[in-house]
Image (cartoon, rainbow, N blue to C red):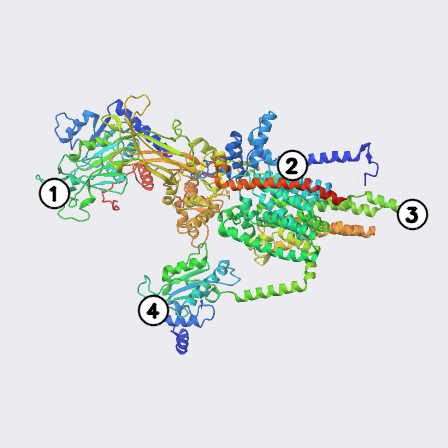
Amino acid sequence: MSSQHAPIRVLGVNVETIRLLLRAIIFISIAGAAILSRLFSVIRFESIIHEFDPWFNFRATKYLVSHSFYEFLNWFDDRTWYPLGRVTGGTLYPGLMVTSGAIWHILRDWLALPVDIRNICVLLAPAFSGLTAICTYLLTKEMKDSNAGLLAAIFMGIAPGYISRSVAGSYDNEAIAITLLMATFYFWIKAMKLGSVFYGTLTALFYFYMVSAWGGYVFITNLIPLHVFVLILMGRYNHRLYTAYTTWYALGTLASMQIPFVGFLPIRSNDHMAALGVFGLIQLVSFGDYVKSKVPHKQFNTFLVVSLFLVTVLGISGLFGLTALGWIAPWTGRFYSLWDTNYAKIHIPIIASVSEHQPTAWPAFFFDTNMLIWLFPAGLYLCFQELKDEHVFVIIYGVLCAYFAGVMVRLMLTLTPIICVSAAIALSKLLDVYLNIVDIFKQEVSDKSKKIKSQTLPIFQLLSKLIVLLSFAFYLFYFVLHCTWVTSNAYSSPSVVLASTNPDGSQLIIDDYREAYYWLRMNTPEDAKVMAWWDYGYQIGGMADRTTLVDNNTWNNTHIATVGKAMCSNEDVAYKILRQHDVDYVLVVFGGLLGYSGDDINKFLWMVRISEGIWPDEVHERDYFTERGEYKMDHEASKTMQDSLMYKMSYYRFTDLFNGRDGIDRVRGQTIPAAQSPELNVLEEAFTSQNWMIRVYKVKDLDNVGRDLKQATAFDKDTQKTTKRKRSVKKPILDLRE
Amino acid sequence: MRLPLVPSCLALLSLVTSAVAGLSSQELQALVRNGGKNKAIKLNDDNFQDILSGPREDHIVVLLTSDSPKINCVLCKEFAPEFELVANSWYEDHPHGLTQKELEDTDRDIPARNVVFFKSEFSESRNFFQIFQLNQIPKVFYFPPSNATGPNSFVNEVSEYQFYQGDHKHLVIDWLKSFTGHDYQIHIPPDYTKIATFAFFTFTFVLLIRKYYKQVGQVFASRLLWSGLTIIAVLLLTSGYMFNQIRGTPYLREQGGKVEYFATSQQSQYGVETQILSFVYGLLSLLVVILLKTLPTIKSDSINFVAVVVISAGIFVTYSALLSIFGLKGSGYPYRFINIF
Amino acid sequence: MIRLTWLFAVVCFAASVLAAAAATPDALVLFDPQLHDLLSQNSTSSLSKFISNLELQYKVTVKSYDDEDIKLLLEDDLAYDNLVLLPSSKKAIAAKQAVSQGQLLKYINAHGNVLVVGDATSVLPESTRVFLNELGIYPSPKNFRYQDHFHTSDSGKVALAPANVVAGNNVISQLSTSEYDGGAALISNNELIIPLVQSSKTGFTAGNKEYLDEDTTWTFGEQGFLAVGLQALNNARVAWVGSESLLENELVQWVFQQKGVLKLQFVHHSREENPAVPDPSIYRVKEQALYTIGVSEWVDGKWAPYTVSNPENNLQVEFKMLDPYQRLDLKPLGPAASVDGLDVLDTQVYSVQFTVPDQHGMFTFGLDYKRSGLSYLEDSKVVTVRHLANDEYKRSWDITNSWLYVASAGLVVVAWFAFVVNYIYVGKTNAAKKNI
């Protein structure tokens, strides 16, 4: 339209140039906002890696930059899962580490900027969030126009649902995966629209990057085929679709198989069968299409029915047969738990024990997306109105992810982008309608030409537009306030360092974790083996640099159960396990003094459950409850509970803090009787942090003269006492000598 | 070994009359056979002394439970069918109790005796529950054969089943096996009604599709239907529908006569919240759609203006309500538009 | 940790051995002047003879239990290498602080050796008795005497036969005395105890009462022991004898670390293909590994190669990760010098070669040699066994089975290329025709 007219000029500058300039400024602002809002934690605390998994990623990245890529690829990690070790190079998604390693090398070798690898890791997620905004812009532009794109970009930049996983220091796979997810989808939409091999290849390329970065790539692997499948069902098959899909599938699958951790999964695991099935289907459809163009209608119908029937029967029986034969692996547990929501609870306590895998209550949705959550259905409605091929994609993505996010809190992350896109479509449509003031005057001009007398300003029209615009401007302003508040209050704690407030209102930093980890690092031999519950494995490996028995990569259930058993058994049983695994130190987290609810006693039942899964004869969950079935630590605590190593390690000398009176556990609000203060024979206290949050115990050696450790401890205690009673010599009661 | 009718009636009579001595094995078997389809006999305040006190010939297993909605015992409801399945399966294998040959088998470690299953409902057996001073249910008690006499003699002979995690059918069987020495099979009765209904519906479904092929096709291709379904699904899912499904949350909570509609925690919710919230989201979405689809089609400026004012006010009020509800969830959330609650 | 303990043990061991080699080892003898008169020169009792025998080899200090200046330990070091505790007339002694049970245990833990001599008519100091009880040795109390009416010597004492010596103890091979007059001890199940001389089936220990019952007897039959040794995990040695007549020279040599003393001179492992690089920290699955150790025995004041006489006593190495994957006998290679450049062949080299299992993980080369009467040899070295790297598998062309697949893949490529050429160039004429 504009090409027919002379270009409009404002102040002598081409309006297109202004538009470009504005767009650039807007982009820079969006990226700035996205990055800056993620820096709360760095400013409040310091440049530090957060939480649990990021510590492993950080450690792996350090390994990568200090070794060659070949060594990284074949890395056998002998500092975790002692004594099994972990084939780390083959069981991780290297994308994240390679990305930061590459940035590190570029900065260092090309730009001569020797930046600490830690700072790169800390700031990687905010940096990529800027890119995510741009990718979201491109994707949304394909759905509607660049106005919607800009809106989607700013939503994506500051939506808390995405910030929660990408604040500075949250160095996790998701940090770059969401960017890649958006990029892959953008290229897919582009390829599908144009039927372009080039874009199909780009899709495959980004898909490969995504596979290398995050296990969530399976989402793409299933979503794109589903999109294609629905389009075929809707009778929208065309050659563009065929070209795009086959290009992506062939290249993407081959590329993804190059990641050692993925290997042959794309052709052997059920998670990937949908993509393969649709690949086959699209060949058949295309063949049918060809036949249809060559044979008469009637014959074709018969052909269609017969071949459809055959294909279905063959496909299903083939899938079942191959699964039964073991050629195709059945669904992975995590994947299965998405569909059968009780599956994990019954079969895989480890998955069920992770708080990220809990279902989502509605406040979380609102918390993470604010007004976008109610613009989301409106956006979907608009997509239905238009219903082009790419809108089908938005709808499928939206519904599927809404389900996933409802089942698992952590999948909120994949839902957020589509909420942003959809809401942006709705809002930009609204703005299209109400921001267009030019139309009013244009209308008037046309009215004039029709010689109608109305000369007054269209005051009603202007007012109604103003009302809508102002109210939505207000909502958007409030949206920004909300996002900032949520980010600063909920998502910016490193969880390694805790913040609390003193009675006088000043901030108190609780740094027990690092205190204990550095104690381990400085005071224990370098090859010391530290046993702790798996939550702390990555942190011990990363911060204390000591060998651990289990960590957050929960690949071996039995080994975790072994640790659980050592924690929940009595000293004699536990000591055997500790000796067998060469354990030197045991670390527990105890929140009773401080009131820190995420401590090991509160996780204890999971340890019991997981070990009960392996040793149902020896460990019984019921034994850890009181007679009345309560979970108690006070004088009512069951005998098994009081004898368990975990109980003893947590409350050892706890009542000493209360001058021999009963102690008060602030997490559980229970009284620990001084008379019940546990005795430790096989362990000795090595370190307790300032607020008693971390307690480290040293495992005693075998007694030099062959006594059992209980006797030895009693003897040591006895000799310390100065008063000695006279003993008459009595004949000992002895077992038969073997 | 079928007992003639008269003695079995006598046995029933004696149940009412005899208050001192426990029932004999034959009497119990008769009781079971007359008990109807469900083989776990009711144990209540009227009959528990007869059955449990005094010398007992049989192994007696009692489930103490309650179906009452007042007590709302989830485990009871889960466990009771499994217990009854074990009981019914036992009687399916031994419709007349153990045969004479089995009873006289001397090779066993534990002498062969019949097993009798009972189920005791709290509301009907308050005295019985009182004797054990129970604080929690369900409980499964086992009473061995005994020669002790006198009322309440059974109290000291009881063994209790521990509710460990796992499949209770098999856990109960293992537990019983350790006392009685019997082998138990499980027979899950096929649910014929379910199969029949399923077959019927499939049949009609196929028939209807064949007949109204065109119409069905139209419905399936209907954009309205799909968009409606999609949006309803999304509204439900984003307001915590799956949370209710997985956690089995209560619809609402009554506390001291006051009805609580909103759980005061970010991490939990009641069933009604999903309904309220999906309505609020839906309303807001609808208003936005009206704002951008319907209103521009109104020709008259003034009517348009009024409509815009009404709709905008509607959005504002609804959104305020949403924020207020969110504030109720108690997270120190500072933002409100107007304070509704 | 195990490695650390071992290191500690080796250091202690080395220290004591060095001391032994450099200076004559010293010994402290504690006695009760009311029972024995050891300080005067002209005493002729058997104990004086024993002490003068000791003085030939050791620097002996003799002190009374009443001497309050006794110090067993100087800070954490040993004041004397060896300690002999003689019977006392009363339970309470003046030096009870210095010779308390705690001090005695510390003394053992610091690698000191203790020889306790019992007696039927006197007592052990209370602390010594508690100390022995702690180890699992329960000597009979005062006035309990070991008796055996079926084996009596001419002088009315109990006669000892060679059968009383516990077989295979590696400490005492035979008894020089045939008469016994003293107490007996019960012993606990402590695995470190080495029974030396055992009561016969008909022997028992009883007090001076006329009748026998639970209170007046201490041991019955073979549950009683007349001499008991114990070797602590740090190789410190303790022995108790029920009577001074059992103070065999062999036993004293054993307690004082002159007999049955072994030393691990070195422990090395390496890849078989590259033995020049010792103790690599990482192996690959299915590699050939070589494990070599040098063991010496202390013979007549110097180290000599230790040869295993009996196949039961073979040295073994375990290659284990939670469970042993390999447990192999070490084969003797011959004597060698423990230190490079030393011209004396003072150690016996044992070695074994094996295949690392096809299982990655942290494996331990574990040597755990515990034979009754011999010093314990313990060593564990943790190594990493890694998986095959991505380029260490066989290439496809090395596997004959794969040729078919490789060829067919190549064929498809060629065929596709031919098809494209055909489609574009050969088919073009038709397309051109159609267009016309």
Mark 4 and mark 1: Cα distance apart in space: 64 Å
What residue is shown with label 3?
A451
Q: Say which amino acid is labelled 1.
A: His
Name the residue located 22 percent from the left edge and 45 percent from the top edge. A731
Instruction: In this rendered view, identify the residue nearer to me: C98 or B109.
Output: B109
Instruction: Tell me whether circle 4 and circle 1 mark residues in contact (CB < 8 Å).
Output: no
User: Quick check: A194 above or below C81?
Assistant: below
Mark 3 and mark 1: Cα distance apart in space: 147 Å
Q: What element carries label 4?
A: helix
Q: Say which amino acid is labelled 2.
A: Leu
**Crowding at label 4, few (<14), some or many (≥20) Cα neighbours within 10 Å?**
few
Q: Are marks 3 and 1 on the same chain?
A: no
- Which numbered dot is residue C151? 1
What residue is shown with label 2?
A131
Q: Are marks 2 and 1 on the same chain?
A: no
Instruction: Tell me whether circle 4 and circle 2 mark residues in contact (CB < 8 Å).
Output: no
Q: Where is residue A261 in the image (x, y as percent from the top left)?
A: 52, 40
Instruction: State which chain disc 3 sits on.
Output: A
Mark 4 and mark 3: Cα distance apart in space: 114 Å
Image quarter for residue B193? Answer: bottom right
Q: Is mark 3 on a helix, strand or loop?
A: loop
Judge from the rendering whether residue A464 lies leftward or rightward of residue A251; answer left or right: right
**Crowding at label 1, few (<14), some or many (≥20) Cα neighbours within 10 Å?**
some
Q: Position of residue A118 (x, y in %)?
A: 55, 31
- Which numbered dot is residue A54? none
Q: Earlier in the sequence, mark 2 or mark 3?
A: 2
